[in-house]
Each structure stands twice: as C-alpha cells, then as structure tokens.
Image (cartoon, rainbow, N blue to C red):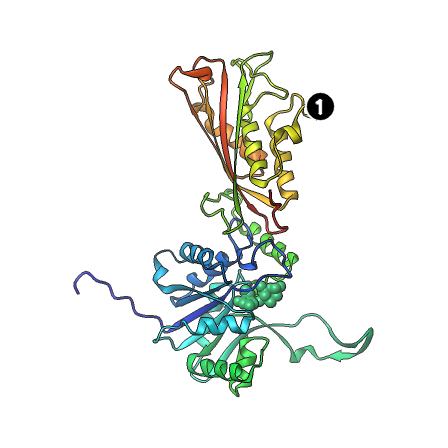
Amino acid sequence: MKGVTLIPVPDTAIIVVAAGSGTRLDGGAPKAFVGIDVHSILRHALDGVFAAAPAQVIVVAPSGFEGDAETELRAAAGDRIDLGRVVTGGGTRQQSVAAGLDALWGDVRTVLVHDAARALTPPALIDAVRAAVDADTGILPTLPVVDTLKRVDGDEVVGPIDRSELAAAQTPQGFPRPLLERAYERALADGVEYTDDAALFAAAGHTVRHIDGSARGFKITTPADLERARHLLAEERPAATPAAPSPVDAQPPSVARVGIGTDVHAFGGDGTLWLAGIEWPAERPLSGHSDGDAVAHAIVDALLGAAGLGDIGEHFGTAHPEYAGAHADVFLARTRELLAESGFEIGNVSAQFQGNRPRFSARRAEAERALSAALGGAPVSVTATTTDGLGFTGHGEGISVTAIALIHSNGLRAGKES
Ligand code: CTP
Ligand code: MG
C-alpha cells in the first residue's frame, strides 16, 4: 500500500436539505439556486459546511435539479468531493431529510441536519453542534427571542408571553444516528409531520439540549432576508477587490443565459475616435448615430439579447434622439438598468474587434475598466485582432465587433423569457 494515503471515514454526516421550492422567496428558481451574490444560496451553505471539520455531506436536491446541485457540490468541495453526494428530496422537508438519511455511510455515528436556506451559518457553529451531540442527546442551536410577544385571538390582544421561556430554533441540528433513524421510522409509521428534526426526535422520547446559535444562521425565507444576506456579504467584501466573479462561478445553475451581439461601423465623420468606452485622440472617428463605439454597441446587443429584451435599435436607435452623440457609459449603464428591471444581473462580457487601428493592447486595461465601471463592475474583457489585410477591416474601411455576454437571474424576479 506504499504511496496510498488512507483518509479516515468521517464519523459524522451533514445532510443539507435544499429540495424546497422557495415559494415565499419567489426567486425564479428553486430557492437553493437563487443567487446571493455571484454564488447561489446552496453554494454559500456548502462553503460553510466544507469549512467545518470533515464529514460526509449529503445534499438533498429538488427533483430535476440533481445535476445543478452536483455542480455546486463540486465547486464547494474541491478535492474533498469524495465526501459529497447528491440525493433527490421529497414533497416535505421531513421527506427530504429521510431521503438524506437513506444515503448515510455505515461508519457515521452523528448526523447533522442543516437547511441550505441558512446559507451564511458559520462553520464554527456546525462544529459546535457536532461536538455537543452525545449517544442519547440531540443538539439544537437557538437564539433568544428579543421581541416582546403577545398572545392574540383575532384582533384582540389576549395577554403577554414570557419570552424567557422561548428560543428561536436554527440549524444544523445534531443527533446520534441510531436514535434519529428510529425516530424517523416512527414518524413515518405514524404519518406525523414535525416542524423540525428536534421536534421529531423529542417526540420519540429523547432529550434535546440547546446551545447558542448565531445571528448569521438566519434562514433566507423572503426577499427581505435575501437582501440582508446580500448586504452582509457586500459589507465583508474587501473594498480593494470589487466583485470579481470568475465566469464559471457567475452562473447560478438553471438561470444563466448568454447573448451575442455584433456591430460594424465605417471610419468617417468629424471629431475623434471613441472605441471600447474611451477616447482615442489621434485616431479617425467611426461614423454612427451616437459616437460610433462599435464595441459598446455590440456589448449592448449581447446583453439585451441574453435577457430577451430586444436590441439596441429598439432602445437607443434614431427614435431616441436623446442618445445622439452619447458615449458608451450612457448606453451601458442604461442597458444594465433594463436588465435589472427584468430580473437579471451581468455575469461577464467578452468582446473582440477586428480592425487595423487603433493599436489596442497598450490601452486594453483602461478600456476594460471603463466598460466594466459602466456595467456596475461586471468583468469585461476586450480583445483585438487584424484580418491579415483581408476584407473591409483589413482595408482599413471600418471596424467589426463581436461580443458575448453571460447574465443570470438577480434572484428578485423571474427572468423574462424571450
Ligand atoms: N426543504 C427540503 N424539501 C422540502 C421542503 C423544504 O429540502 N420538500 C428544505 C429547503 O430547501 C430549505 C429548508 O428545507 O433549505 C427549510 O425550508 P424552507 O425555508 O421552508 O424552504 P422552502 O420550502 O424552499 O421555502 P417555502 O416554504 O417558502 O416554499
Ligand atoms: Mg417550506
């Protein structure tokens, strides 16, 4: 066995239930696949799980989304992918947990059940729950209830409730495996649905203790919760590194869309050249209704096309005199707004122009920064090529541009289908 490293099989499994539809969030995709930032809710949850001590990780996915869950699992697990597995969930949370239990490895003694919807749960809380479970006790993370609570009957306030007796339940909830499995069998046999695993476990006569939960362990249920998660992540992102998603990471599964745009302009007219969002003082201008910036126009068409929102002529053509002479920043910023209003945010954009002039490479970074800034920070790359003296670009008559764009649902509204 020389050269083979034997990795001990973990004695703990974490079942991440992600099979819900997310009706209250209404994010245009099953909740787990709605983006918080460039990463989905599920991806954030799994990042937390894999940052905790090694465990078997079972992702319970909505039926039909197993492949998407697998993609997220692979991205989060990295070289620990052998610990991960995706199974199909059921119609209720309890059925989804049961499906996860069926996939446990033989050596597992402790089972943690975790809501994917609690995407920002700290790894330390996961480890704390795991450490607190013993052979006959379940563990529940809780937060104190801070609001003053009242008992009501219709519109009448009937009386106060002593909140010191109450606690708000979170996940992961941890249990000794044999007792949890038997409790689930019993619930199945009785046909009873419990509100969470701790309730199901307690109903089978077992003890559940609570430990301190975390404010970050809140459940993303409504659009306001998603906003809260977005703000938390945005605040934590170092200012020097703007959201710099890699194109691959920027695709929450099932809701990514691509678009293509092309544009051609002839050299001609007065003034200076505007291309790729910047001015080129010594160069011949391109003619056009606006500043003739063919790179920007191709990008606008790629973005509108990806979102199924028509094309540049419809939104910025000669029927819109307010755009005459406008530069790339105006077009691109408005395009980004149009996409946002339709429920999309931009993943990345790549454009290539063919032309003899201008010599582009020395100012590539400057151009990419300008275009990216106009698109709210989305990564934009621009490449340039000549055509070996062939065709109108090779003859120096004009410039031809192709752009493609990747966009995805911003989680606030279902994307408009084209
Ligand atoms: N869950 C599940 N299978 C179900 C229902 C829920 O795996 N049949 C999971 C959800 O994916 C979520 C967790 O249980 O991670 C908590 O459920 P909840 O927040 O209610 O999510 P949804 O059921 O998706 O949302 P909604 O109730 O708004 O439809
Ligand atoms: Mg639900």
Above or below: residue 281 compared with residue 410: above
Residue in the image at 50% along x and 77% along y: 139
Residue at position x 54%, y 78% in the image: 198
Position in image of residue 83 (x %, y %): 36, 64
Structural crowding at the residue carrying mark 1, measured as other residues with C-alpha within 10 Å and reported as few (<14), some (14–19) or many (≥20): few
Residue under the point 56% across and 53% down: 36
Q: In this picture, is 320 found above or below 240?
A: above
Q: Quadrant of the N terminus?
A: bottom left
Name which quarter of the figure residue 376 lies in.
top right
Q: Position of 402 compared to 219: left or right? A: left
Establish if 181 lies above or below 45.
below
Disc 1: which residue: 321
Front-most of 225 and 125? 225
Q: Is residue 122 left or right of residue 103?
A: right
Q: Quadrant of residue 134?
A: bottom left
Residue at 56 percent of width and 35 percent of height = 373
Residue type at the position of mark 1:
Pro
Q: Nearer the viewer, residue 403 or 176?
A: 403
In percent of width and height, residue 330 lies at 64, 30
Does the image show residue 417? yes
The extreme left residue here reads 2
* 116 w.r.t. 28: above or below: below
Rendering coords of residue 106 (x, y %): 35, 76
Confirm if mark 1 falls within 8 A of ligand 1: no
